[in-house]
Image (cartoon, rainbow, N blue to C red):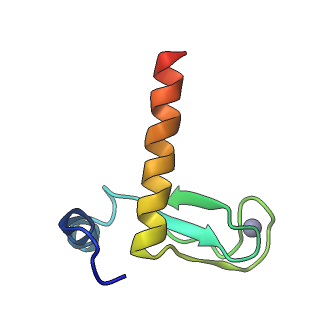
Amino acid sequence: MKNHSRDLEYIDELRTHHRRLIPLICICDDCQYTFEAENKPERCPDCGRLKVREATAQEAETYRKVRAEIEKEEQQG
Ligand SMILES: [Zn+2]
């Protein structure tokens, strides 16, 4: 998608310069498990397959949205 937000570009830039502070969002191509890691592991922590890749900007955005929703629900009890 061409029209992705400035925020994401900013996060990408931050991640490049401060890799340790902002975890990488990784996704498993096999089971679609999405998780944060400092460094991309070879194996998926969920299914154990060697199918882990870096999430695209769009996948990362979706992941952040889902996480935000979960946090909101947890706060509401
Ligand atoms: Zn997996």
Which residue is at a point 49% across and 68% down the rendered structure image? 59
Residue 32, quarter of the rendered image: bottom right
Q: At x 55% / y 15%, what residue is drawn?
A: 77
- What percent of the width, then of the height, locates residue 70? 53, 36
Q: Residue at x 33, y 58 (%)?
A: 22
In the rendering, at what x and y percent does residue 2 appear? 30, 84
Q: Farthest residue in the top direction?
A: 77
Image quadrant containing the N terminus: bottom left
- Horizontal side of residue 57 vs 8, given as left or right: right
Q: Is residue 21 above or below residue 4?
A: above
Kindly tell me whether residue 38 is visible in this rendering: no
Q: How many marks?
A: 0
Q: Nearer the viewer, residue 4 or 9?
A: 4
Q: Is residue 15 left or right of residue 34?
A: left
Q: Position of residue 29 (x, y in %)?
A: 68, 77
Q: Is residue 51 something that shows in the picture?
A: yes
Q: Residue furthest bottom?
A: 2
- Tell me where residue 21 appears, x and y as whole percent: 30, 55
Q: Is residue 43 left or right of residue 19?
A: right
Image point (51%, 48%), residue name: 66
Q: Quadrant of ligand 1?
A: bottom right
